[in-house]
Amino acid sequence: MEKLTVPTTPIEGQKPGTSGLRKKTRVFMQRHYLENFVQAIWTAIGGVQGKTLILGGDGRYFNDRAAQVILRMAAAGGAARVIVGQGAILSTPAASNLIRQRQTDGGIILSASHNPGGIDADFGIKFNMPNGGPAPEDVTNRIFEATRTITAYDIVESRDVDLSRTGETRLGDMIVEVVDPVADYAALMERLFDFDAIARLIAGGFTLRFDAMHAVTGPYAKAILEDRLGAAPGSVMNAVPQPDFGGGHPDPNPIWAKPLVDLVMGPDAPDFAAASDGDGDRNMILGRGVYVTPSDSLAVLAANAHLAPGYADGLKGVARSMPTSRAVDRVAAARGLACYETPTGWKFFGNLLDAGRATLCGEESAGTGSDHVREKDGLWAVLLWLNILAASGRSVAETMQAHWREFGRNYYSRHDYEALDKTVADALMGDLRGCLAVLPGQSFAGRRVTEADEFAYDDPVDGSHSAGQGLRIGFEGGARAVFRLSGTGTEGATLRVYLEDFVDDPTRLDLAPETALSDIVAAADAIAGIGAKTGRLAPDVIT
Ligand code: G6P
Ligand code: ZN
């Protein structure tokens, strides 16, 4: 087998973002584009000589081609073994699990998460570390540096490796081990949760729907929910992964998964419904007539996780991203648990999980997970919910009511202003930053500001400092408005305004969130001048 050293030159813009390198698929398909980036990963991790790596992706367009290129480049770099999901498929949490279980040197995940797929949509690639978590900034900086100085990459010439069947083959001296993408992940879930109790619940007539959104969780959800737990055939909807996700946005929120929300709000509602995203790390939880916000879901899971065997000994602590509502803080306070507030981005949970300071983590952006892997995990959240419902005998609606009666309710909503002119958005944030100091004591829309600051995070494990992580304004009575610019938007700037108000009056636990939050919405606009500065009369997206 011939090894080629192909001369190349640096390609602009190969800087990994929040979650690896994400670009238009056609950009990735350009000559040398993928190869340059993969060679840069090898350089950044000190080469792959003798190493074992995991490889898989969410099945979007170009996943299969990219996997073949990466295998040839791993062989050229002298890797000992690459463990690949059959068909080059692995969900992000399943890849994280395999990296850990097989004690590998890391892995490559091919995904652009919840972004659409297809030749005219998005593609992505990221490297995860031996702990199963996304590469930290020093590694992604080294990758970027390497993309700027690259002069050649190594690749072997060979036919495509057959990834359609499980088993071992060779590519030169390297072993390619094709594994069932579901098996190890399903076994992990079976260790964490009481499958018998969930199966009994379902056998007793409890109905559920899981929308895989034509993305990677289809085979996982079918194997676990239908085959092992006995949910009726067809309970998993849109279960066959497609390279373009059926033309949709595989993002599990009330906007992109509207048909599922309509179903639970209608006459044929199942007892429980959920959805996950392109690569299987996000989740949305629904019950008959109920949408559970991600922030509330985290709080409910924290309060009840001990009902599942994997968490029966209790939690070491909990963590949430700063803009996530403080519902989980109330659970932590009541149960004497440590509670960490981190900047937006799953990578900030990694140290807390590795150090055993937190067991559960969550974000308002539909991410929930635990120390079982080092990524957020959509199906894990679904199974923990089902385990809790099976153990408590309550419906989703009853669970929420009981939770709010015990802990109070943090009404919550996020308003997004998308594709703003970047200068306008920066100026709005700058003006707001400039007046934070004088806000406390002033009242807006009848609500008095008690505190205002710019969030910065000092990692308690490695001491690193992250500044400029969003502007927080606290109001009397436990209400809050948070302002930040999205770190994942692709067009102009996206302003996110996170609105929250705390209520423990038992007669006010059932308000519509927009009603409960109306004065905080008005106060946020009065303080930041969103309408006046952006010319936008209303947010583009409300979740
Ligand atoms: C990705 C990250 C999350 C983050 C989300 C929103 O999904 O994995 O950790 O919360 O993006 O980020 P943004 O900067 O757009 O609010
Ligand atoms: Zn994702």
Image (cartoon, grey):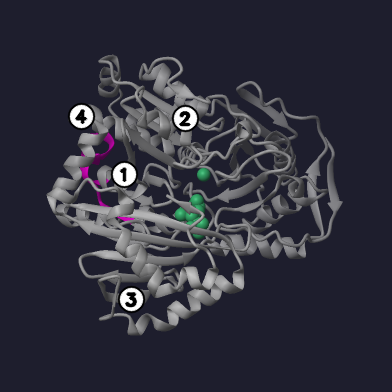
Q: What segment is highlighted magenta in the picture?
A: 302-319
Residue at the spot x=30%, y=56% of the render? 357
Name the image quarter holding the N terminus: top right
Marks 2 and 3, the one that precedes in the sequence: 2
- The residue identified by callout 2 is 211
Residue at the spot x=85%, y=45% of the render? 4
Question: Is 38 contained in the magenta span?
Answer: no
Q: Residues within 10 Å of mark 4 (few under 14, many from 20)?
A: some
Total tally of numbered discs in the picture: 4
- The residue identified by callout 4 is 391
Between the C-alphas of marks 2 and 4, the distance is 24 Å
Residue at the spot x=79%, y=61% of the render? 10
The local secondary structure at tag 1 comes to: helix
Q: Would residue 356 be visible to someone looking at this image?
A: no
- The residue identified by callout 1 is 297
Along the horizontal axis of the image, is 499 left or right of 423?
left
Between the C-alphas of marks 3 and 4, the distance is 42 Å
Q: Position of residue 28 (x, y in %)?
A: 74, 48
Task: Name the kind of residue labelled 4 in the image.
Answer: Ala
**Ligand 1 within 8 A of label 3's CB?**
no
- The residue identified by callout 3 is 452
Q: Compared to 292, does 208 lie above or below?
A: above
Marks 3 and 1, the one that precedes in the sequence: 1
